[in-house]
């Protein structure tokens, strides 16, 4: 009896030891997860983890949710809205806490795995080292491509045809440089045509949540970690934070050197501007308002933007189509003619982190500038020299934090819809950009036609520079007038002719 009594505890102890050893090699200790999230994408992962916690508590023992402090938003920063995942955590009955002062300083909680999904804050090495299994992240791209906080935005902005999801470890050194544990098989998931940020999030978020749970069930979080990422055959793109400058309308137009051959891949296009609006929403730009007494620069937010492919499109009002066609016809008859044309003068601004494009054109204001353009076409000076305005080049002044380029665009108003239509000045001059609404300096939103009438103006010597579709080489042909005839022209006529010639060259 003594032997039997003593043998039972012994057998249970051995069995318990064997069970723990087998369990540890396959799945590790039960997970006490600290989940750091914010947006709708992270909500799907949290819901999937909670469901797995209910179904298999031996894998996930507990889940604590951590969010960043709510920040004031809206006009005047008067509205404070909490992140979506906070309400989801409360609905699921999970412990919820807010990161004090938006920093991990002096913050600690006993957990053994940190999962960060769209959190926006770097998890310090101190916490990752304290957690038994470190940290994991769900990233909606095929890493290492599109590293950064906005992979969905840039997948759409770059017109990707496929994308995917990666499960990676949290690196103690930098964002999105951990070991990729699981990834969508190549070529990835097709991005449906005309996808928006919301629709692409709805497509990838459930997939990322499923991959996260599957990775935990398979023990991918246990060391040693195996990297399964791919190496793109093209240069890796990054997905930086979508800042205010990202929503600026890129009005930049190419210089003579690119117009005479092919446009660079980075050259903006009115269709690209419409695509940018489709992804990011309302876009902004600066409008230069000139009066006889002063010049003002007003910030204008443009919304309800679309691209019209050609004059036969059913989306283009017949009255506008006829007006554009008439202007083109008059231009073909006499491309040097002067005509009063309504224009808007936009200001493209580059900050200190943006380089001036190689095809950044100088401001055409004189015959001297025209002569430099001709010299550029002949190869007598470089594009850098032409842009600097002097032979030999000229560096940007010290302390200069930005560069600016003024672009004038003719517009066609449509009083019935309140929209304005801008003629595309590059890539053959085909297409129109429609802007339906504008908001000036925080004032109430108004139809674009009303804002354009108030802030725009009419100019002369403009038609040739904006509507001419003939090859640029023809515009560079010598003037038909002889030098002795030029001497007989009055100064005003010379000024107008030279200005029209230069503007025609640059197709502003």
Image: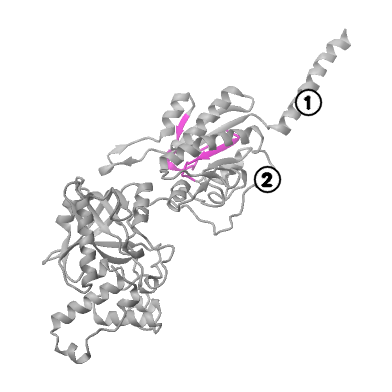
Q: Which residues are magenta?
A: 96-121
In the rendered structure, the answer to whether residue 190 lies left or right of residue 56 reads left
**Membership of 149 in magenta stretch:** no
Front one among 50 and 281: 281
Residue 7 image point, x, y percent: 85, 15
Question: Tag 2, which secondary structure?
Answer: loop
Quadrant position of residue 361: bottom left
- Neighbours of disc 1 within 10 Å: few (<14), some (14-19), many (20+): few
Task: Name the quadrant of the N terminus.
Answer: top right
Residue 214 seen in render:
yes
Single out the residue that lies furthest toward the bottom. 484
Quadrant position of residue 458: bottom left
Question: In this rendering, is residue 50 above or below 351?
Answer: above
Q: Residue at x 15, y 80 (%)?
A: 493
Residue 495 image point, x, y percent: 18, 79
Q: Which residue is mark 2?
A: 226
Residue 467 image point, x, y percent: 26, 66
Q: Residue at x 43, y 39 (%)?
A: 199
> Whole-Å distance between the Cαs marked 2 and 1?
27 Å
Question: In this rendering, is residue 361 above or below 160?
Answer: below
Residue 37 seen in render:
no
Residue 268 image point, x, y percent: 37, 61
2 or 1: tag closer to the N-terminus: 1
**Membership of 105 in magenta stretch:** yes
Q: Which residue is mark 1?
A: 18
In the rendered structure, the answer to whether residue 228 lies left or right of residue 19 reads left
Front one among 38 and 279: 279
Count of number-bearing discs: 2
Question: In this rendering, is residue 61 above or below 248?
Answer: above
Question: Tag 1, which secondary structure?
Answer: helix
Task: Name the quadrant of the C terminus.
Answer: bottom left
Q: Residue at x 36, y 64 (%)?
A: 427
């Amino acid at each position: 009896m003594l032997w039997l009594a003593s043998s039972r505890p012994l057998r249970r102890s051995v069995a318990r030891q064997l069970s723990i050893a087998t369990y540890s090699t396959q799945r590790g200790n039960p997970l006490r997860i600290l989940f750091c999230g914010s947006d709708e994408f992270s909500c799907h992962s949290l819901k999937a983890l909670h469901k797995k916690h209910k179904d298999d508590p031996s894998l996930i023992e507990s889940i604590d949710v951590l969010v960043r402090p709510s920040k004031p938003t809206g006009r005047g920063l008067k509205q404070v809205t909490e992140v979506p995942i906070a309400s989801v955590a409360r609905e699921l009955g999970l412990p919820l806490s807010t990161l004090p002062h938006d920093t991990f300083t002096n913050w600690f909680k006993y957990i053994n795995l940190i999962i960060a999904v769209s959190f926006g804050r770097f998890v310090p090495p101190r916490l990752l080292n304290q957690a038994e299994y470190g940290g994991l992240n769900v990233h909606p791209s095929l890493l290492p491509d599109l590293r950064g906080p906005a992979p969905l935005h840039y997948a759409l902005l770059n017109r990707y045809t496929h994308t995917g999801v990666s499960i990676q470890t949290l690196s103690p050194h930098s964002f999105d440089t951990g070991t990729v544990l699981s990834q969508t098989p190549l070529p990835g998931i097709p991005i449906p045509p005309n996808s928006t940020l919301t629709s692409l999030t709805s497509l990838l978020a459930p997939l990322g949540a499923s991959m996260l749970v599957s990775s935990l069930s398979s023990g991918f979080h246990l060391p040693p970690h195996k990297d399964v990422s791919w190496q793109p055959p093209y240069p890796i793109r990054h997905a930086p934070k979508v800042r205010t400058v990202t929503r600026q309308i890129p009005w930049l137009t190419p210089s003579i050197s690119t117009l005479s051959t092919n446009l660079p891949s980075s050259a903006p296009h009115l269709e690209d501007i419409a695509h940018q609006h489709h992804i990011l929403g309302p876009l902004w730009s600066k409008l230069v308002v000139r009066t006889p007494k002063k010049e003002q620069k007003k910030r204008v937010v443009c919304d309800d933007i679309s691209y019209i492919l050609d004059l036969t499109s059913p989306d283009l009002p017949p009255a506008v189509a006829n007006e554009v066609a008439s202007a083109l016809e008059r231009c073909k008859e006499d491309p040097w003619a002067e005509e009063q044309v309504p224009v808007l003068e936009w200001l493209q601004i580059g900050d200190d982190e943006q380089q001036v494009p190689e095809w950044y054109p100088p401001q055409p204001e004189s015959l001297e500038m025209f002569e430099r353009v001709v010299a550029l076409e002949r190869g007598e000076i470089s594009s850098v020299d032409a842009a600097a305005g002097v032979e030999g080049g000229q560096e940007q002044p010290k302390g200069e934090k930005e560069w600016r380029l003024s672009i004038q665009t003719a517009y066609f108003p449509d009083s019935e819809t309140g929209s304005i239509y801008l003629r595309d000045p590059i890539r053959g001059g085909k297409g129109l950009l429609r802007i339906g609404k504008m908001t000036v300096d925080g004032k109430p939103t108004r139809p674009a036609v009303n804002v354009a009438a108030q802030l725009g103006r009419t100019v002369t010597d403009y038609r040739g520079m904006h509507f001419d579709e003939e090859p640029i080489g023809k515009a560079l042909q010598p003037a038909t007038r002889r030098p002795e005839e030029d001497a007989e022209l009055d100064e005003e006529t010379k000024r107008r002719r030279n200005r029209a010639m230069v503007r025609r060259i640059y197709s502003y």
